[in-house]
Amino acid sequence: MLPTPGYHCFVALLLVLVMAPGLIGPAVRATAPTTAEAAEHSMKQFLAQGDTLRPYRAMRRLEARNGDSVGWLQASTEFAHSTGLRYTITAEGGSGSIRDRVLRAVLDGEREVIARGEMARSALAPCNYAFQAGGVDASGLVKVLLAPRRKERVLVAGTMFLRPTDGELVRVEGRLAKSPSFWVKTVDIVRTYERINGIVVPVALDTKAQVRMFGKATLRMTYTYSEIDGRPVDAGR
């Protein structure tokens, strides 16, 4: 079984996952502004798009590691506003404790959060964050600094990266605004997004936590979509 501190660490990772921002709709394409204006311009474009969860079907792979213990599973997931989140495990392996107490808990927790209508608590929106334009990085992406308005473990102090032409979200990275317990020193996340079928969706999440006396714990989740907004996804995108 996982040590108790390690389990608390994975609970923190679960909260980051289930309170993720939703799927973002099509953006209005625009000509790239000058570098001096790019960050402010793209930030305003992003905030104007809203943060709405869209119906989808996706195969997810989840893998977690705590010390020498590793567990993984694959799940077919489906979300619709009328039915909420549903999932079916299609394959699994490794540590049974991690699979049952962590990976299934991630999916069950996400299902419950959606059912209770609590997704808005962590949305990338002005009610949760103060946004500050931070210039353009070496790869040409606009950086926007995220300052949580509350010290909550579902909010992230860090940076989001946007495309300068339309404010499209590419990546969010940072550290939980509040540690979930004494045992967990830090929890860092990187969430990656892509535009598929005209909708910006999360495609990967990597989370690392430092647990006192028990070292590093990690969780990775990837998405392969088959349908978004009722439309099949072309395998070649």
Image (spheres, rainbow, N blue to C red):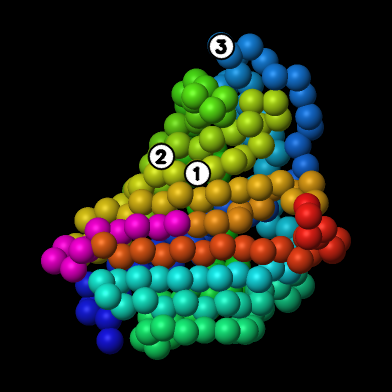
Find disc 3 in the rendering and name its residue: 36
Q: Residues within 10 Å of mark 3 (few under 14, many from 20)?
A: few
Q: Secondary structure at mark 2?
A: strand
Percent across and percent down for residue 27 are 76, 37
The reply to whether discs 2 and 3 touch (Cβ–Cβ < 8 Å) is no
Q: How many numbered circles does the render carry?
A: 3
Find disc 1 in the rendering and name its residue: 172
The answer to whether residue 130 is left or right of residue 31 is: left
The reply to whether discs 2 and 1 touch (Cβ–Cβ < 8 Å) is yes
Q: Residues within 10 Å of mark 1 (few under 14, many from 20)?
A: many
> Can residue 116 be seen from the camera position used here?
no
Question: Residue 54, located in which quarter of the rendered image?
Answer: bottom right
Find disc 2 in the rendering and name its residue: 158
The answer to whether residue 34 is left or right of residue 183 is: right
Q: Earlier in the sequence, mark 3 or mark 1?
A: 3
Percent across and percent down for residue 197 are 80, 51
With respect to residue 199, does 224 lie above or below? below
Percent across and percent down for residue 140 are 57, 25
Give, as a single range, the part of the protein colored magenta: 206-215
Q: Residues within 10 Å of mark 2 (few under 14, many from 20)?
A: some
Q: Earlier in the sequence, mark 2 or mark 1?
A: 2
Kind of residue at disc 1: Val
Q: Was residue 212 drawn as part of the magenta stretch in this picture? A: yes
